[in-house]
Every structure is written in C-alpha cells, then in structure tokens.
Image (cartoon, rainbow, N blue to C red):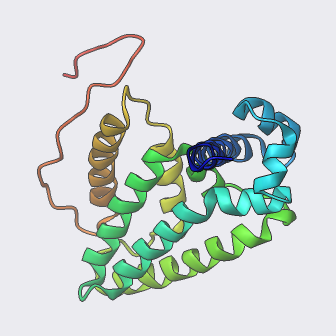
Amino acid sequence: MTAQVITKLRSDARDNRVRILAVARAAFAAEGLDVPIREIARRAQVGVATVYRHFPTKEALFAEAFAEPMATCSAVVEEGLKAADPWRGFCLVIEKLMEVHALDRGFSRAFTSRLPAAADYFTADRDRTLRLLLELIRRARRTGELRADFVLEDLVVALMANEGIRAESPGMRVAASRRFAALMIQSFRANPVAAPLPPAVRLPLSARRSAG
C-alpha cells in the first residue's frame, strides 16, 4: 500500500469520525440515548461497523460528541468566577454561554435537558459547571447588581429561548444571540440601566410587522 493511499484512508477516516459525531450530537440531543447506532450510521452515511470502529459503545460516542462544547462551557464559567467584579463576570458568562449554545443547538438541548442515567459521564461535568454557576450567582447577588430573586432556572430558561433562534447563517445566529443576551442581562439586573443594544438581526418571519 502506497503512502498516498494510506494518507487518503486516514483522511476518509477523519471525515467519517467528524460526520458521525455531528450526526450523533444532533440525534442524542433531540431524541435521547435511545437512538440506535444503526440509525446514526444511516444518517452519517457510513456502515455500522465504521461507527463501532471509532466508538466501541454508544456511551463513548455520546461522551465524545459533547466533550468539546462541555469543556468550553466549563472554561467560560471558570473565567467568570475569576473576574474581580462578580457582576461583570456574570455578564461575561451570559454572553459567552449564549454564543456557544447559539452555534450548537444539539449541545444546548443536551445541556438544558434531563438525560437518562446512562449519561452520567456527561451530567457529572455539567453538574460541576452548574455548581460553579451557582457560586457566581451568589457572588453577583452580594454585589447588589444581580436581582435578589434571580435563580439558576432563570438562566436555563434564557438558554432554552436562545436555542430557539433561527437565522440564515451561524454568524447571524450569534449576532441575534448577542442582542438577546444584552436584553436578558438588563432584565436580570437589580436596577436596570438603559444601555445601547447590539444591532438587531433580520430573522425569517412568516409575517413581518414593523414595531410601533
């Protein structure tokens, strides 16, 4: 076997792995862990053996599918906790989490959903991130900037709403998410201060009506 053929095989294997992960992420988030490996293989246009060659178990596939965005979310929350001003740290976390979730709807659904017991390997990391978020919320409340009745579930609702943003491109989704994050931050503040919002984004609507 020539070096060129070996390189081509390795390239094909990498492409298959990326496609399998993308399909699995969307399927698991929308339908849970009950989605059969055979169905994931069909959607990814590969054989079942190819899936198992990359991921020996469904649990391993699930963990790998969401490992990167989960690590990103954890890093964002840790960054917020390190901020000298807890309120600024809280705002940073809202902005960045919404951007991550806007770019990956599958992960957003997994992050905000109750998952089967078999997903413990994912929920352990998620629960750790949520505990860090709770600590940041407590600190932000103590500054008096975050409203005293704010609870973690309020952020979860905001993330679920953010996941519903529909736009023509990832860039437009992120732009719309930034404006939504700014609106949410103002609503979470104990004493809202009027501030300019990021630019509005034209989104697909069945019927457009001008405001006011």
Frontmost residue, 127 versus 144: 127
In the image, farthest residue toward the front: 2
Residue 53 place in picture, x, y as percent: 81, 53
Residue drawn where x is 70% and y is 45% of the image: 24
In which quadrant is the C terminus drawn?
top left
188 horizontally vs 28: left or right:
left
Query: In the image, 107: left or right of 24?
Result: left
Name the residue: 36% across, 31% down.
169
**In the depicted structure, whether residue 77 falls above or below residue 117:** below
> Please, is residue 169 above or below residue 178 in the view?
above
Residue at horizontal 31 percent and vertical 35 percent from the top: 172
Res. 79 visible in picture: yes
- Front residue (pair 170, 17): 17
Name which residue lies at 86% across and 40% down: 48
Instruction: Please tell me in which quadrant of the rendered image residue 115 appears.
Output: bottom right
In this rendering, would 10 be left or right of 149? right
Q: How many numbered callouts?
A: 0
Direction from residue 162 to residue 42 in the image, left or right: right
Vertical position of residue 182 compared to residue 67: above or below? above
Determine which quarter of the picture holds residue 142. Answer: bottom left
Place of residue 111 in the rendered image (x, y in percent of width and height, measured from the top left): 61, 58
Residue 185 percent across, percent down from the top left: 30, 60
Asked whether residue 151 is in view, the answer is no
Task: Give residue 71's position: percent from left, percent from top.
Answer: 52, 70
Q: Residue 4 or 201: which is nearer the viewer?
A: 4
